[in-house]
């Protein structure tokens, strides 16, 4: 693991690291924000998963989350969204291939060798972070759009692993919208039943842990009706008796202006759960 960026930020350090990933079979980058409290004690971690077309830079340069992480004593970890490298297969368009890993473990060729972002986020990355940084075993997870989908799915499938979960404009029902159908058919094959393992709306019905789901969604989001449809998750969660807090935010779109406007509330939400001991 090699540090390739090191910048002072709100009394702490915003770093970026590169490492060889055994899970993905390529070199990967992830960002770590260490608030000033990390100099003398271990802190909990909030993992952030970004969306389509993004890498580890988008969140750390646009969201303004470091200010709130410093305030609450929380380490931020933001991985890249997808495998990278000349040997990694790609596709035309922004919604498939590099920049569009969808946080699944691909099962079809040629994708299965590298596109295993689910295992990377759940297992390899936390092991790396917990071995190399002053962190506790208290974890939270959040994300935006495709990354919001990833955060919800990962939290729902791993009871006890995360203290809290939230999402901005998540793809809550990828098996029912064009983005998800395209990606899942490519990465997972034609069996639509297999897709449900990565669909928050399907998973919430049988979730073993009823971790509250905090979701912010702009009502002026250009993808709201066609790709996101958060009411599908709200309805499924209500049927299952699973707590969900869907906050429709008037006038906000899908951009990082939206995320920056509410990221402080999300960091505070996670900090309460992470510091609950």
Image (spheres, helix red, strand yellow):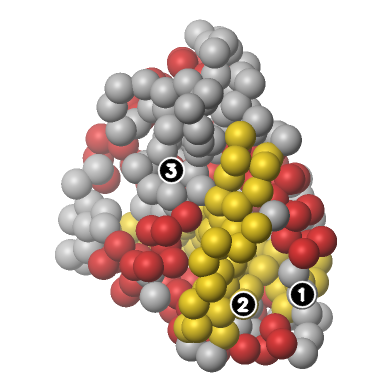
- Real-space Cα separation, disc 2 to disc 1, in angstroms: 9 Å
Image marks 2 and 1: residues in contact by CB distance under 8 Å: yes
Mark nearer the N terminus (3 vs 2): 2
The answer to whether residue 20 is seen in the rendering is yes
Residue 173 pos. (x, y %): 44, 35
Disc 3 or disc 1, which is closer to the eye? 1
Q: Nearer the viewer, residue 200 or 76?
A: 76
| Residue, disc 1 | 134
Disc 3 or disc 2, which is closer to the eye? 2
Image marks 3 and 2: residues in contact by CB distance under 8 Å: no
Q: Quadrant of residue 115?
A: top right
Q: Residue at x 77, y 64 (%)?
A: 132
Q: Residue at x 42, y 23 (%)?
A: 90
Q: Which mark is residue 146?
A: 3
Crowding at dot 3, Cα within 10 Å, few <14 / some 14-19 / many 20+, comes out as: many
Q: Quadrant of residue 182?
A: top left
Crowding at dot 2, Cα within 10 Å, few <14 / some 14-19 / many 20+, comes out as: many
- Compared with residue 36, is residue 162 higher up or lower down, i.e. above or below? above
- Real-space Cα separation, disc 3 to disc 1, in angstroms: 29 Å
Q: Residue at x 57, y 55 (%)?
A: 30
Quadrant location, the C terminus: bottom right
| Residue, disc 2 | 34
Where disc 1 sits, the SS reads loop
Quadrant location, the N terminus: bottom right
Residue 211 pos. (x, y %): 66, 58
Q: Residue at x 78, y 86 (%)?
A: 41
- Real-space Cα separation, disc 3 to disc 2, in angstroms: 25 Å
């Amino acid at each position: 693991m090699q540090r390739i960026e090191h910048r002072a930020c709100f009394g702490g350090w915003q770093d970026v690291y590169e490492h060889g990933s055994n899970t993905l079979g390529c070199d990967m980058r992830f960002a770590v924000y260490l608030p000033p409290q990390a100099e003398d004690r271990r802190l909990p971690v909030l993992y952030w998963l970004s969306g389509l077309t993004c890498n580890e830079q988008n969140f750390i340069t646009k969201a303004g989350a470091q200010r709130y992480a410093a305030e609450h004593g929380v380490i931020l970890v933001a991985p890249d969204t997808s495998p990278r490298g000349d040997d990694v297969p790609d596709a035309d368009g922004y919604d498939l291939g590099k920049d569009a890993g969808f946080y699944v473990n691909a099962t079809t060729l040629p994708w299965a060798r590298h596109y295993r972002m689910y295992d990377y986020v759940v297992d390899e990355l936390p092991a790396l972070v917990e071995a190399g940084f002053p962190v506790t075993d208290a974890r939270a997870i959040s994300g935006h759009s495709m990354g919001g989908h990833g955060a919800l799915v990962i939290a729902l499938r791993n009871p006890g692993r995360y203290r809290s979960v939230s999402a901005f404009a998540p793809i809550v029902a990828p098996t029912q919208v064009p983005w998800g159908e395209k990606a899942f058919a490519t990465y997972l094959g034609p069996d639509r039943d297999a897709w449900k393992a990565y669909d928050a709306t399907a998973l919430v019905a049988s979730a073993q842990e009823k971790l509250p789901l905090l979701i912010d969604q702009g009502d002026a989001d250009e993808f709201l009706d066609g790709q996101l449809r958060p009411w599908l998750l709200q309805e499924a969660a209500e049927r299952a008796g699973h707590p969900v807090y869907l906050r429709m935010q008037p006038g906000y779109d899908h951009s990082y202006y939206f995320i920056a406007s509410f990221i402080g509330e999300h960091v505070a939400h996670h900090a309460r759960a992470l510091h609950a001991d």
